[in-house]
Amino acid sequence: MKTIESRTSPLRGELTVPGDKSISHRAVMFGSIARGNTEVTGFLPGADCLSTVDCFRRLGVEIDTDIGSGRVTVRGKGMRGLCPASAPVSLYTGNSGTTTRIMSGILAPQSFTSLISGDESISSRPMRRVILPLTLMGASITSIHGNDCAPLRIEGRGLHGITYRSPVASAQVKSSILCAGLYADGATEVIEPSLSRDHTERMLRSFGAKIESFEDKDGWHARTFSCPELSARRVTVPGDISSAAYFIAAASLIPGSEILIRNVGINPTRAGIIDVAVRMGADITMLNIRNDSEPSADLLVRHAPLHGVTFGGSVIPTLIDEIPAIAVMAAAAEGTTCIRDAAELKVKETDRITTISENLTAMGCTVFPNEDGLVIEGRGPENGAVLKGALIRTGGDHRIAMAFSVAALIAEGQTVIDNEHCVEVSYPGFYRDLSAL
Ligand code: S3P
């Protein structure tokens, strides 16, 4: 439990948020099956990414981690070199959906059997979305309790390419299929209704895989081919925009604030929060834009009065993890915010339509949750304490804990976060950074 008081002073100063979680996971996974050493800088030492490191160590990969400096060296084994000490190998993915789903695509074509399990949240999240396409490729994957969730038993075998039309825009699904496709005969293609984050395409391409991506009337296509070998590359991980989101929200909401968030990843498939926040009236300036394989920039954020907006459709995958932070901004904005086409929120670490709605309601906000989003009645920008302190039930969800810690700063009275430790999944130093500004 953590008690947070409302904040009377503005946020001022600079910070660097930890490395991007999605890119950190991929650097370890793809580095493990590449030839040579993948040197990673800016690696996120959060619990989720450390679960990935642990899994690939169990698969026989040497991975040196210097957590303090964010330097990681993955001593790649090559496409066919994963070799667990004993089979079936038991792999524990903790709270990490990204590890569970993408690693399934890497394990399906191996020559050994793997068992994947995770924590309570992972054990109730849908895995059918990867079991189905991988099975169509020839994989043998069983949900051990027969509920389409982890634990999963994966008996490795030869795969063949498919064209798969994914009903959801999900980078975890797309990446899982593309990874399996590297091992499959022929071409493997995923068609998504909207473009999900493209870190896999960018990184696999830089490791030497042939990846084609394009949009046509059917949707967004990502295609790969049987790949004999990947070559290790240096990976520079920018700061995680999903972690920057809490500070964008806090600085926008607290009068007098002005902060500089250094080196934030602004890949267009991730940066939807900037567009929506600016539409809400936020004052965000991008400085020092660097167009590396993963673009990044420094973000200057100043307090500004916010107003409600409506958003949905193809922007949703570009800000899906930031919706808890955006919802807190909406709660303190003038007017109504409508979030649409975001049914995926229901299958995150918690059902975030419910956890956002219940916690905002506890703080005195009027919220109408629905099947694919939320309608939030903003309580107005400049009224001093616009929310009231409450007990926040995180459900162990890191993003709910962090978003509502920001809400606590503008609330009247004390707010209690029921489990502050869950932030370790993606942002171990969150509370230290928040209090340093
Ligand atoms: C992720 C993809 C997204 C996101 C998750 C990380 C990734 O999930 O919500 O936090 O690294 O590929 P979906 O693929 O389920 O949309």
Image (cartoon, rainbow, N blue to C red):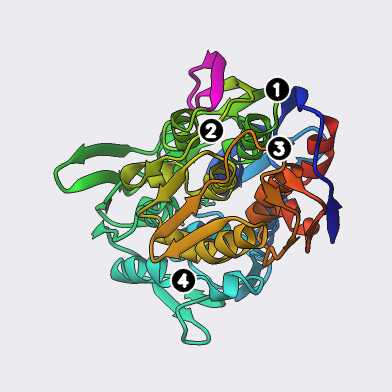
Sequence-wise first label, 1 or 2: 1
Percent coordinates x, y for residue 274 in the rendering: 49, 31
- Disc nearest the viewer among 3 and 2: 3
Nearer to us in this view, 351 or 191 = 351
Sequence-wise first label, 2 or 4: 4
* Residue wearing tag 2: 306
* Residue wearing tag 1: 259
Q: Is mark 2 within 8 Å of ligand 1?
A: no
Give the Cα separation between the discs numbered 4 and 3. 42 Å
What is the three-letter code of the residue carrying label 1?
Ile
Q: Which residue is at 67% across, 57% downward?
A: 363
* Residue wearing tag 3: 384
User: Quick one: label 4, few (<14), some, or many (20+) residues within 10 Å?
Assistant: some
Q: Which residues are magenta?
A: 282-296
- Disc nearest the viewer among 1 and 3: 3
**Magenta stretch containing residue 335, yes or no?**
no
- Which SS class for mark 4? loop
Give the Cα separation between the discs numbered 3 and 2. 14 Å
* Residue wearing tag 4: 126
Q: Is residue 320 above or below residue 58?
A: above
Is disc 1 in contact with disc 4, using a CB cutoff of under 8 Å? no
- Disc nearest the viewer among 4 and 3: 3
Give the Cα separation between the discs numbered 1 and 4. 38 Å
**Magenta stretch containing residue 292, yes or no?**
yes
Q: Which residue is at 36% across, 66% downward?
A: 134
On the question of residue 192 being in view, the answer is yes
Q: Is residue 87 above or below residue 237?
A: below
Give the Cα separation between the discs numbered 1 and 3. 20 Å
Q: Which residue is at 32% across, 44% downward?
A: 314
Sequence-wise first label, 1 or 3: 1
- Which SS class for mark 2? loop
* Res. 138 image quadrant: bottom left
